[in-house]
């Protein structure tokens, strides 16, 4: 962290340089100046479920309730939440996961940059064939600073070959949910457990050979898609060896602690991942499992759950880790009304744009 510094910003919000302040620079801004924030995982299309899906009984119970719960028509829709992300929360970059791949225009209209991860899933041959069209489309420009790309939902819901095809598409890094429930590993290692039983009840023809016999991280490695920049979301139930393997590969562990605690009552072993040299990013998940889409609201939870990780690490995670490969730094300048990163542990501060992306 630099004190009494001057940040030079281009007209598109790109940081051009940082230098020590001089006497003739004029009045200084009080507080902490940072790059625009990054929400590395959310689901804008679920915004109508805010506060309506109880948790605490594990992922499958929560997922079943969310499917049965109809969105509340009185709640502002995802487009309004996208504007809130930028205007109220100071978010410059968003990784949004969308079942229909239709949320990109919401981000463009809000002035955000980022990636719409058009979710592909299916273990039945008919589902896999339908998802193939999304994968074949590859990376599609949506508007200024926003693209859409295919990304698999998770290895528990998506055929491994379809996972490999989706993540092999070039462009910005893909994402997938990993080890959000212990039932995922049971399915992958032994081909049994609640997920297997559920797929059978649905009549899916998914048993086309022996199970992979390995955990999610090892399977991604076997498929050739465990690589630098891949966003592994949640990772709550990843074992120590899997965490170390993901860290060595340069994958980014993307944590959503308020959502994880709401659904599963725990967060990933983040300290072990960071100690292994792993990079972290922070998301909010959807309003179906978190009360706000403000990534700074996640930081007090992380400070309490993982006190071994310094707040500077989390500040870096919400300002750069998930954006560098995509935006090139065109993220503007945000002023936080705090004196140091340590203050973020006490709660999200007030903030305002000093140089908004695209409007400098």
Image: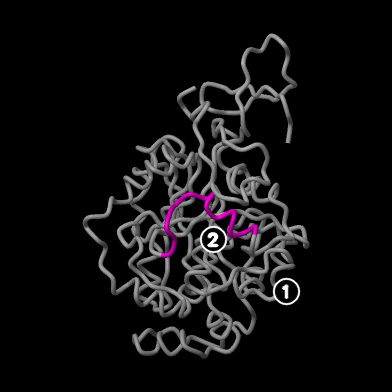
Q: Nearer the viewer, residue 294 or 141?
A: 294
Classify mark 1: residues with Cα within 10 Å, few (<14), some (14-19) or many (20+).
few
Residue holding disc 1: 240
Q: Nearer the viewer, residue 232 or 174?
A: 232
Q: Is residue 222 above or below residue 40?
A: below
> Residue shown at 43%/79% (left/top)?
60
Classify mark 2: residues with Cα within 10 Å, few (<14), some (14-19) or many (20+).
many
Quadrant showing the N terminus: top right
Using the image, tell me which numbered label, if any, was put on residue 346. Answer: none
Q: Is residue 198 above or below residue 1?
A: below
Of the residues under marks 2 and 1, which one precedes in the sequence?
Answer: 1
Q: Magenta residues, as a range?
A: 289-303
Mark 2 near mark 1, Cβ–Cβ under 8 Å? Answer: no
Name the image quarter holding residue 238: bottom right
Residue at the extreme top of the image, as rendered: 24
What secondary structure is the magenta-colored segment mainly?
A: helix
- Provide the secondary structure element on which disc 2 rests: loop
Q: Is residue 336 above or below residue 314?
A: above
Which-is-in-front pick, marks 2 and 1? 2
Any magenta on residue 298?
yes
> Residue shown at 49%/22% (left/top)?
360
Name the image quarter holding residue 35: top right
Residue holding disc 2: 256
């Amino acid at each position: 962290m630099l004190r009494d510094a001057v940040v030079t910003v281009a007209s598109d919000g790109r940081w051009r340089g940082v230098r020590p302040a001089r006497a003739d620079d004029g009045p200084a801004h009080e507080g902490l100046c940072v790059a625009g924030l990054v929400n590395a995982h959310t689901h804008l299309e679920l915004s109508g479920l805010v506060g309506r899906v109880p948790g605490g009984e594990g992922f499958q119970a929560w997922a079943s309730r969310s499917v049965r719960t109809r969105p509340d028509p009185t709640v502002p829709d995802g487009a309004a939440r996208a504007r809130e992300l930028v205007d109220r929360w100071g978010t410059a970059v968003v990784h949004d996961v969308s079942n229909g791949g239709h949320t990109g225009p919401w981000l463009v209209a809000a002035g955000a940059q980022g990636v719409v991860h058009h979710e592909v899933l299916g273990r039945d041959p008919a589902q896999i064939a339908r998802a193939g069209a999304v994968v074949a489309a590859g990376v599609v420009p949506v508007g200024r600073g926003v693209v859409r790309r295919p990304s698999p939902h998770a290895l528990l819901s998506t055929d491994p070959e379809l996972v490999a095809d989706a993540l092999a598409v070039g462009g910005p890094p893909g994402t997938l949910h990993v080890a959000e429930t212990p039932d995922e590993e049971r399915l992958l290692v032994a081909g049994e457990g609640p997920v297997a039983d559920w797929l059978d009840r649905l009549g899916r023809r998914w048993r086309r050979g022996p199970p992979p016999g390995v955990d999610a991280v090892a399977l991604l490695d076997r498929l050739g898609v465990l690589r630098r920049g891949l966003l592994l979301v949640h990772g709550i139930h990843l074992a120590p060896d899997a965490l170390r393997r993901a860290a060595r590969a340069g994958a980014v562990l993307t944590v959503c602690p308020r959502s994880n605690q709401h659904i599963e009552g725990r967060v990933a072993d983040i300290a072990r991942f960071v100690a292994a040299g792993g990079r972290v990013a922070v998301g909010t998940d959807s309003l179906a499992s978190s009360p706000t889409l403000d990534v700074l609201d996640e930081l007090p939870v992380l400070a309490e759950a993982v006190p071994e990780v310094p707040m500077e690490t989390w500040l870096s995670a919400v300002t750069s880790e998930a954006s560098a490969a995509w935006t090139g730094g065109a993220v503007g300048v945000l002023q936080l009304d705090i004196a140091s990163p340590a203050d973020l542990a006490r709660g999200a501060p007030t903030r305002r744009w000093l140089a908004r992306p695209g409007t400098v």
